[in-house]
Image (cartoon, rainbow, N blue to C red):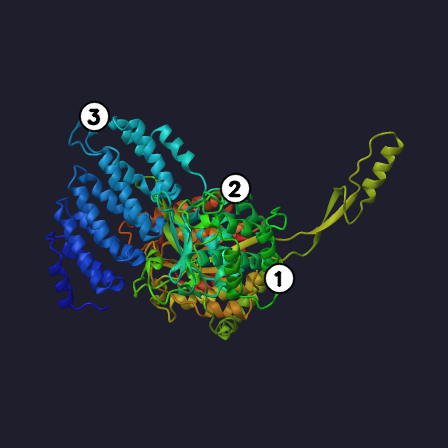
Amino acid sequence: MAMSDEQLEAWRAQLTCNFEQLDHVFADCMEEASALLSDAGIKAYLEGASLVCMIGRGFEPVLVYLEEMPEVAAQLGEDTLELISQTVWKMSRSPNGKAILPFLQTVAEAVRRLGSADLLRAWVDFILDFMERTTGSIHGFHTTIPSPGLPVMLERMPQLLNTLSLRGIRNWAEYGLRYYGDHPERQRDYFGLQSADSRAVMQRERHGTLFADNERKLDLYMRALWREKEHFVPYSSAFDELRKPVPYYDALGIRVPDVYDDRNGISGIDRYRALLAHIAAHKRWTTPQIADNYSPFQRVAIEFFEDCRVDLMAMAVYPGLRRIFLALHPVPAEDGCDPETESCIRHRLAMFSRAALDPGHGYADPDLLDFLQQFHALMARDDHATKDVAALAISYIARTRRPADMSPNIHFEDTEVDYRDDNRHMWRFIEEGDEEEMFQEERRPESEQEIDGLPPRHYPEWDYRSKTFRPNWVSLYESLHPPGDPAFIDALLARHSALAKRLKQIMDLLKPQQTVRVRYQEEGSELDLDVAIRSLIDFKAGSNPDPRINMSHRTDGRDIAVTLLIDLSESINQVPEGCDKSILELSQEAVALLGWAIETLGDEFAIAGFSSNTRHEVRYQHIKGFSEHWGDEVKGRLAAIRAGYSTRMGAALRHAGHYLGARKADKKLLLVLTDGEPADIDEPDPKALIHDARKAVQELDAEGIYTYCINLDPHADDYVGDIFGKQFTVIDRVERLPEKLPQLFLSLTR
């Protein structure tokens, strides 16, 4: 919402903090906060900032809180504002004041990696517990010495969160506390990842498949195979041993574990696929039932039967799921539960579930076999539904009921099918009671706007000051550019018909003109008579003949893959002095000619545009794919390109290299068309993004990708060499771009 001066003054009055520097940034911070938070959220935001100001640690913690917390609250809910401010207050009441700033600087990365409010609370509880256990406990004496390991651990927390699950971080920390609790210097080395055993323990705990590393892949799995676009909310069982959480889904998304280990020969990623396939099957085929009509025992039975029904339907669509489901499903022993002393209801249902999925189950119980036959007869009908298996499940539980089923001693062994959710989606309650209290009511902020398209791909960014990468620092969103009018591009090409004619003469010289004979082949398209006669003479003379008596032919041609990466930042909307067209219009003309030229040559070619709005939003738009021809669809996208925002080049280079590196070509060329140096609004250091782009170019060079820059900035000599070395051309007269760009490409690939 727009801010008036009166509103800004009212907000400033709520923030009880008198740092002079605050007046310079307060308006910008409140502009972001007002766009992301509700009125109550803004109030909590300012109260939290006031609390951080009161701790007496200077202006920087206040600034970090004001900058980071609106986005944190927008992602995980406004309750996180109080959670973080109160945590800072607790830390300030201990001798650990120096750890406050690294804690605040780590929160945003923790939120991105953890992905849910529950996991964030668990992480904060871990930090506070660690602080309490390591403060004032040197050689058994009570002291006021601050925790020696807390600040360095918080500095390393982004790397830890990027490498380990929450359980892994806790186990890694427990090892350090156990062996170095009384040694401050060794604590610093261990929790700063400087000691060998610290790195070894971290590597040991780095097991399993982390959801954060595979979210994009799983999102594509749901879209491609199940036509479902889902919001994932990860959780961890590391901090909830008494009440073990299980997957479920509701209107807010799918809750999934933050890590899966391999199990029974099934990889962690396939366990995620099994879970999501089961949930997708429920969403497609399960009809909610009125819970008030059934007893708790009946509901449990209905859930087991419905799980079996949707699993069988999923396996009918994708038969490969059968192997995964059976490997993850427990195999209860028929005599595994004592009906005289234990409640065996879960055991009987787990046996039925196994038998329903596994034709070779081997069970002999007559009731189980009778109902299994009825179940498969039901599945053979075309019109079976949830209400049908509900009736069958009630009959099964009634016939097999035992007196001990009411016993509190419930048999759980081999009854948990962990790829299945908790089935809360199956029930609708007319009257609220104790049963539904466990279903937490959650609400997203009404102002939250989800970005439509693929989930983000995260890239590191080079920090030239520390000479290290910031892991997963940049979020890049890719999309297919919306179409426009292809006739606009055809008109541009017609306007440059004379230039196109000259280019065609050059291209005719570059196109493959002849075939080349490849001799000395054991297998080929025809016999090489000279070699064959020589081999026959050798054979007659008693020598070993040369078996390479065939030859083949190949085209003496080009094997090149090219990506053109266009800078679509706001600056290309400018009209250069002495020119009647904007840089954007000139770029369209140049790219149109280049696209036509490369299509004529037959080279593999892709076009993409990029821009950025802070490190959290780098936009990468596909205009032409390698497999697409230069047709109306591609021309339409090129005609529709628009410019805006900033130029965070490093992430765009890495992403373009990701696709170009996968091409099978002898030569891979990445052309970058830009009008200025890398920059973004959240990076005050003008050198930072230049160094990161330079590092990206070096990475691409190591992968065999040749990067070349066409720069339209007359002052580019001051920085372009720092990024691309000698691999650049500066075009001072921008109006000549349509002529220069195709010619430059032809000279690079001659």
> Which secondary structure lies at badge 2?
loop
Compared across the picture, whether 196 is left or right of 686 comes to: right
The residue that appears at 40% across and 45% down in the rendered structure is: 695
Q: Nearer the viewer, mark 3 or mark 2?
A: 2
Q: Is residue 711 visible?
A: no
Residue 573 image point, x, y percent: 35, 66
Using the numbered discs, state the Cα–Cα distance from disc 3 to disc 1 in whole angstroms.
71 Å
- Dividing the picture into quadrants, the one containing residue 163 is top left
Using the numbered discs, state the Cα–Cα distance from disc 1 to disc 2 in whole angstroms.
28 Å
> Which secondary structure lies at badge 3?
loop
Q: Sequence-wise, which precedes: disc 1 or disc 2? A: 2
Using a 10 Å C-alpha cutoff, classify the residue at mark 2 as few (fewer than 14 neighbours), some (14 to 19) or many (20 or more): few
Residue 140, label in figure: 3
Look at mark 2 in the image and give the residue it sits on: 336
The residue that appears at 16% across and 49% down in the rendered structure is: 52
Q: Is residue 302 visible?
A: yes
Using a 10 Å C-alpha cutoff, classify the residue at mark 3 as few (fewer than 14 neighbours), some (14 to 19) or many (20 or more): few
Look at mark 1 in the image and give the residue it sits on: 377
